[in-house]
Amino acid sequence: MQIARGLKTLRMRADLTQSEVSKRAGVSVGTVNRYETWQDRAKLRIPTVKAIADTCGATPEELETLVQLVRNQENGWWMDHPAVPEVMDPLMSFEDIAQYEHVFANALVPGLLQTPRYALALHEAQDVRSRADAIADKVDARVRRQTILDRSPALHLWVVLDDAVLKRCVGGVDVMAEQIEHLHVMAQRPNVDIQVLQFTAGAHAAGSGGHFLLLGRDDTGDPVGRMEVVYLELHRGGLYLDAPTDVQNYKLMFDYLRSQAADRSASLELLAAARREFTG
């Protein structure tokens, strides 16, 4: 999916139609379309990918990443994010086609719900040796990623927030008050569900596990279009799991977490109370 999203994004960036790309790359329009829509996965050819990417002005880094992705399609989902150009970021590729995203957040607000100031504070703490402009670029990318919640049809985001997320003061009291207010507003959108897993709930289904996302697409009319993948967030990258047993285990875990957390209505009240703690 990273390959398909990468080729389509490169073409859009170059402001070319599929027909224009086919003529310049020396391939058929059907081939360009199949590669962009993730058809004939087993038949992807490196020369064709390179021809399309070159036509769309891919950088050497982007071209090399595409080639490596074609060569290693069957090697699992290990991905080191800093080494992958944004147009082929696997998480963004999965979110592009997902119908739903379920998140357990045990320490920090999920990226799709972060305010710019909260995201900036996080990156300043995590990337202490990075230049200010590099950090600003990361924050901008995070904010752009959030537009996935405004698309049509909308992505359905369901988040279980550990109480710790609301207690950890990131960026100062003003930043936290703004962030929690944003969570309160977003939780009232029809495509966003937020539940708070209170400390009083005690031990829970995730145990000592960390932040994870479950992304899925249920396409009964097109089995090839069906997708389920788990993303485990690590410090400098992430682990992707798509084995049916792994996915099922995390789906079950998330179901238990939802049952252990406060319901939507009670969670709205908890968010309002948490905001008051930072506003006095």
Image: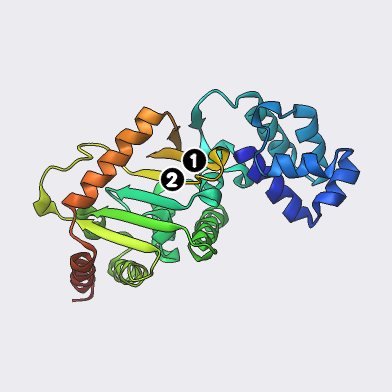
Q: Image quarter for residue 24?
A: top right
At 32% across and 55% down in the image, what residue appears? 159
Percent from the top left, x then y, of residue 212?
A: 35, 42
Q: Nearer the viewer, residue 109 or 207?
A: 207
Disc 2 marks a residue whose amino acid type is Leu
| Residue 249 as seen in the image, left or right of residue 156 | left
Q: Is residue 124 visible?
A: no
Mark seen at residue 215: 2
Q: Nearer the viewer, residue 47 or 98?
A: 98
At 24% across and 64% down in the image, what residue appears? 264
> Which image quarter holds the C terminus?
bottom left
Distance from the alpha carbon under mark 2 to that under mark 1: 8 Å
Percent from the top left, x then y, of residue 136?
A: 53, 58
Residue that badge 1 annotates: 227
- The correct choice, above or below, for 178 with respect to 223 in the image is below
N-term mark: 2 or 1: 2
Percent from the top left, x then y, of residue 83?
A: 58, 36
